């Protein structure tokens, strides 16, 4: 009896770690990534709401960046930030969606069309739930009336560049192309986060929470769509096998 239970547990674990199984490695990795990102976001949210030690660090970092501001760096940071908000961000998303459509990458097209707008709505909902005021300075570089936690710009950048990186890592066989895609995406996300800190629009915990939020949301959609694709492929193969057996 014990041996049978042990064998079932081993088979279950092997199935969860198999890249060929319908509910295999991709689903397992996705669930673990979602759990980790959500745990990080929850810890940051609780710390912010509880006014714990991280809020002191937030204020120190915000004041330090504000004191270092100078031209032309301020203009560069404004430009980087501007590219990841409003119309420019919509155009980037539509351009990526158009590329997926032209390439026949239908599941990736679904991912970009579903994950990005719902991710933006999620970010707004969290902002109005937490209702954290933005950093305050005597001479602010930007003046915004919306809430601070989490950073919408950083969340949008993480969603867009993270999705693009995942796509390129999967479709590009060359390791250097994959590495370049990951480094480029990480660099862009960090630049956007840095621009929001530099401009005094957000605290450090705001941008960190935004990254965790978008990583979790993107992992949920990619895992769901990947599982759907695998189920359809498996069902199509079974139908083909049945038709072939019937013809014989």
Image: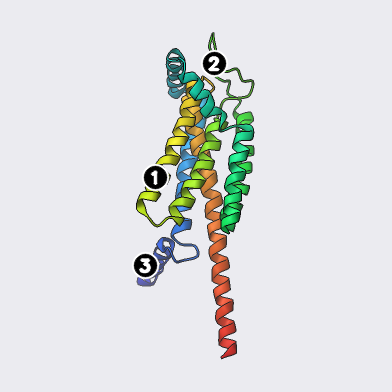
Between residues 124 and 15, which one lies in front from this camera angle? 124
Asked if residue 111 can be seen in this view, the reply is no
Where is residue 107 drawn, in percent x and y? 58, 57
Between residues 5 and 179, which one lies in front from this camera angle? 179
Q: Which residue is mark 3?
A: 6
Within 10 angstroms of label 2, few (less than 14), some, or many (20 or more) residues?
some
Residue 138 quadrant: top right
Q: Vertical placement of 176 versus 140: above or below? A: below
Which element is circle 2 on? Answer: loop
Q: Earlier in the sequence, mark 2 or mark 1?
A: 2
Residue extending furthest toward the top: 138
Q: Which residue is mark 1?
A: 180
Which residue sits at x=43%, y=22%? Answer: 53
Q: Earlier in the sequence, mark 1 or mark 3?
A: 3
Q: CA distance from mark 2 to mark 1?
A: 33 Å
Where is residue 212 drawn, in percent x and y? 49, 38
Q: Vertical placement of 146 versus 157: above or below? A: above
């Amino acid at each position: 009896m014990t041996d049978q239970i042990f064998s079932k547990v081993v088979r279950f674990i092997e199935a969860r770690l198999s890249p060929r199984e319908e509910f295999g490695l991709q689903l397992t990795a996705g669930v673990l990534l979602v759990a980790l990102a959500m745990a990080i976001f929850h810890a940051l949210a609780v710390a912010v709401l509880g006014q714990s030690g991280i809020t002191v660090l937030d204020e120190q970092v915000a004041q330090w960046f504000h004191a270092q501001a100078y031209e032309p760096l301020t203009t560069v940071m404004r430009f980087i930030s501007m590219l990841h908000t409003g119309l420019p961000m919509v155009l980037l998303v539509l351009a990526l969606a158009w590329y997926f459509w032209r390439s026949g990458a239908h599941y990736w097209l679904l991912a970009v069309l579903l994950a990005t707008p719902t991710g933006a709505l999620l970010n707004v909902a969290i902002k109005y739930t937490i209702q954290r005021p933005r950093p305050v300075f005597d001479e602010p570089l930007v003046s915004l009336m919306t809430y601070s936690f989490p950073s919408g710009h950083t969340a949008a950048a993480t969603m867009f560049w993270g999705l693009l990186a995942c796509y390129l890592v999967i479709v590009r066989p060359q390791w250097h192309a994959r590495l370049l895609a990951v480094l480029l995406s990480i660099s862009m996300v960090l630049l956007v986060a840095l621009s929001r800190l530099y401009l005094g629009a957000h605290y450090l915990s705001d941008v960190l929470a935004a990254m965790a939020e978008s990583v979790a949301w993107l992992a949920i959609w990619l895992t769901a769509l990947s599982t759907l694709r695998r189920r359809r492929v498996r069902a199509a193969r079974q139908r083909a096998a049945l038709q072939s057996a019937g013809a014989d």
